[in-house]
Amino acid sequence: MKREIIISIPFLLLLTQVLALEPCPDPKNVTECCIMDKGTGYFITRDIRADGDCFVIPYGGASGVNCQNHKIIGNGNGIAFNISNRDNEIITYCKITNFTIGINIERSDLVIVEKNEIYGNEKGIWFYPDTPLGYGSIIRHNILFNNNVAGIDIAGAEKNKIYDNFIAKNGVNAADNSPSESYWNTTKTQGTNIISGPYIGGNYWDDYSGEDLDGDGIGDTPYGIVVRGTDYLPLIDIITPRYSNIQAPTGSLPYDPSATYEFNITWEDNVQLDKVFLELDETNYTLIKTDEYLGFDSNYRVEHRANYSISFTGLEPGTHTYRWFANDTA
């Protein structure tokens, strides 16, 4: 019952909010929330802040939306992209955050959602219960992270193809409550996946508890979707963290009891940095973390990166030895 109450709220809001939106004046230069009612491609050319619903794509509307890596930022309510009665649609290169629903797909088939970062919403992607039981849609190469209720929630629609996504730290990572389940992996194929592993297969799930005994980056046991559905080829992290930009005192330095000595490093990982610490003279120290980033790298694969630093004053004269340590969630 709790799920049904939460699901119904955004559509009560939608009835009052859509009326305030106007058609987008120029599909090639979208700079504010609007109705995408022309059957052409739309290009978002700046970050946009929404007060409720942002973009509505009706029957005969946009054939595709390219956010060009701009952010669509909500006020905690509404829907970022509401796709209704529109088949053959593509949403790509968007960063969607702080909405009730990031992308809503209603009575629409063959919608492609690709290379988006969808995070910090109540629900990332929701298939409305009235979506037809037809050809299905494709959800691939997306980051769905930290959505409070669900990353992907399929209340309607079948035969969707959902693969090569990074899905982590959502209330429920994925749920499929439709009459017939979707496909949560594609055929195992050699090629770099979203977490930089060697095979395309299923999705990366941060709560997957299986093993990868042969080291191919694919879990040996399936991942079960809430209610129904199975990812038979869940992606496994087999890549260790990497470091760069080490800065530390070197060589012989004149002793000064009031001098400050600073240590800096950048760590990055393909999935999620877990712990980083500095060992100085066999003592471990907690670090200050800055410039943290979780999103796509330049090749649209997941990257978690942060700078770490620590300073010491009053080091004793003599030789000091330090080591950096980092590990990821795997």
Image (tube, rainbow, N blue to C red):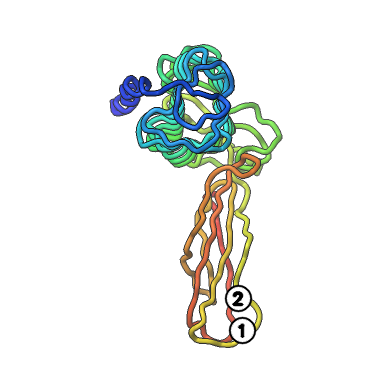
Report x, y in % for residue 66: 57, 29
Report x, y in % for residue 6: 32, 28
User: On the rendered structure, is 152 left or right of 218?
Assistant: left
- The answer to which of 8 and 179 lies nearer the viewer is 8
**Residue type beneath disc 2:** Pro
Report x, y in % for residue 252: 64, 84
State the image quarter where residue 280 is shown.
Answer: bottom right
Report x, y in % for residue 17: 34, 24
**Residue type beneath disc 1:** Leu
Which residue in the rendered view is the most extreme toward the right?
190
Quarter of the image with the N terminus is top left
State the image quarter where residue 22 is shown.
Answer: top left
Residue at the location (44% across, 31% down)? Answer: 102
The disc label shown at residue 196, or none: none
Residue holding disc 1: 253
- Secondary structure, mark 2, is loop
Residue at the location (61% across, 68% down)? Answer: 247
Q: Are marks 1 and 2 in contact (CB under 8 Å)?
A: yes
Q: How many neighbours does mark 2 have within 10 angstroms: few (below 14), some (14-19), or many (20 or more)?
A: few
Q: How many neighbours does mark 1 have within 10 angstroms: few (below 14), some (14-19), or many (20 or more)?
A: few
The disc label shown at residue 249, or none: 2
